[in-house]
Amino acid sequence: MKILITGGAGFIGSALIRYIIKNTEATVLNIDALTYAGNLDSLKEIDSSDRYSFQKINICEMNLLKQAIFSFEPDIIIHLAAESHVDRSIDGPGQFIQTNIVGTYNVLQISKEYWLQLTDSKQKKFRFHHVSTDEVYGDLENSGLLFTENTPYAPSSPYSASKASSDHLVRAWGRTYKLPVIVTNCSNNYGSFQFPEKLIPHVILNAISEKPLPIYGDGCQIRDWLHVDDHAEALYLVATQGRAGETYNIGGHNEKKNIEVVHFICSELEKIAPQFKINIKNFTDLITFVKDRPGHDVRYAIDASKIDKELGWRPKETFETGMAKTVHWYLDSSWWYQKILDGTYRMERIGGSK
């Protein structure tokens, strides 16, 4: 089986590739533009596999994208390439429109052309799997409800609006052109190799440097936390066994307030890394409440019962086990994050193919 993955040098994409190479016999082509959050160091442990290859391609470059897809001849395309940081989308929404909407159109259009020239038997087996977010559903506030696959879309940020647009494009290509598409919407991911601007790595790395731990508003925003390794397993399962035309929500069953997440990290660091406290008594002393993000959603929560019933998937990690592993990983992985923090990784980036 051949699987082409867009955005495979990103946080979730790299986890998916590591999972596939280590647990299946599939061959993977990773297409990534290596923008600021793409990091080939995240794939070092599988980079030598003869079943893995990489091409530096931006999904907005139609000709290069088409050449890669037609040359590789994938059985499955898993589309993860996206701009994904809400704060960045507020400050500069244009890149999100270009990558998440125009880029997704490009991948869809070329995938359709590729699919149409396949034999009937290969057409039936082919899947286009689009990876999206629960943020497209908007804000549950304090309703006590959960996002289902039928929840109406109500995106709040430029990021979530661009992802909602890409979801609509994928479903339209499925309905109009009969392209066998699948959409997954996931809750907040965390785990190893996550870019340091995100909440959890940001808090870990700031805490061990005795820097402020900034919390938006009162910190009572609620998210459903999903370990990235659980997500990777679910993505492969959906891509290979999911039904064409369906949507599957993927959640971690771990609703936590942001302030609870920060307190847990501080508590874990108190147990395993007290040596980093030099000028403070407790890591929680670093918590700083800052002005809330514009349009900040109060609560997201996923109903993941469909993927459980149809495909038998449930997350393996609890919040406590997954978060403890994540804290330990960052403490042991300065080789990965330090080059990002000091800017040297950006200087080292090279293009080309493996």
Image (spheres, rainbow, N blue to C red):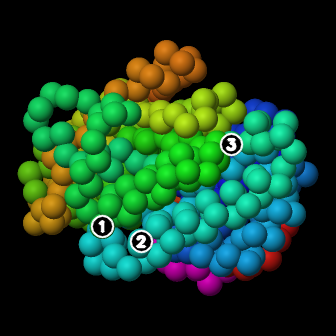
Q: Which residues are the magenta region?
A: 338-348
Residue identified by numbered label 3: 127
Amino acid type of the residue that numbered disc 2 sits on in the rendered structure: Phe
Residue identified by numbered label 1: 158
Q: Earlier in the sequence, mark 3 or mark 1?
A: 3
User: Disc 3 to disc 2, how far (Cα)?
Assistant: 25 Å
Binning the other alpha carbons within 10 Å of mark 3 as few (below 14), some (14 to 19) or many (20 upward) gives many
Q: Nearest to the eye among marks 3 and 1: give it.
A: 3
Magenta span: predominant SS is: helix
Across and down, in percent, residue 310 comes to 54, 18
Q: Is residue 340 above or below residue 1?
A: below
Across and down, in percent, residue 136 comes to 33, 50
Q: Residue lying farthest right?
A: 50
CB under 8 Å between discs 2 and 1: yes
Amino acid type of the residue that numbered disc 3 sits on in the rendered structure: Arg
Q: Nearer the viewer, residue 319 or 69?
A: 69
Across and down, in percent, residue 288 comes to 14, 60
Residue at 29% x, 37% y is 151
Q: Is 344 inside the magenta-drawn segment? A: yes
Amino acid type of the residue that numbered disc 1 sits on in the rendered structure: Pro
* Residue 182, quarter of picture: top right
CB under 8 Å between discs 3 and 2: no
Quarter of the image with the C terminus in it: bottom right
Q: Which mark is residue 96?
A: 2
Q: Is 319 inside the magenta-drawn segment? A: no
* Tally of numbered tags: 3
Q: In the rendered view, does 30 fall on the left or right side of 14?
A: right
Q: Nearest to the eye among marks 3 and 2: give it.
A: 3
Say whether residue 274 is visible: no
Residue at 27% x, 42% y is 152
Badge 2 element: helix
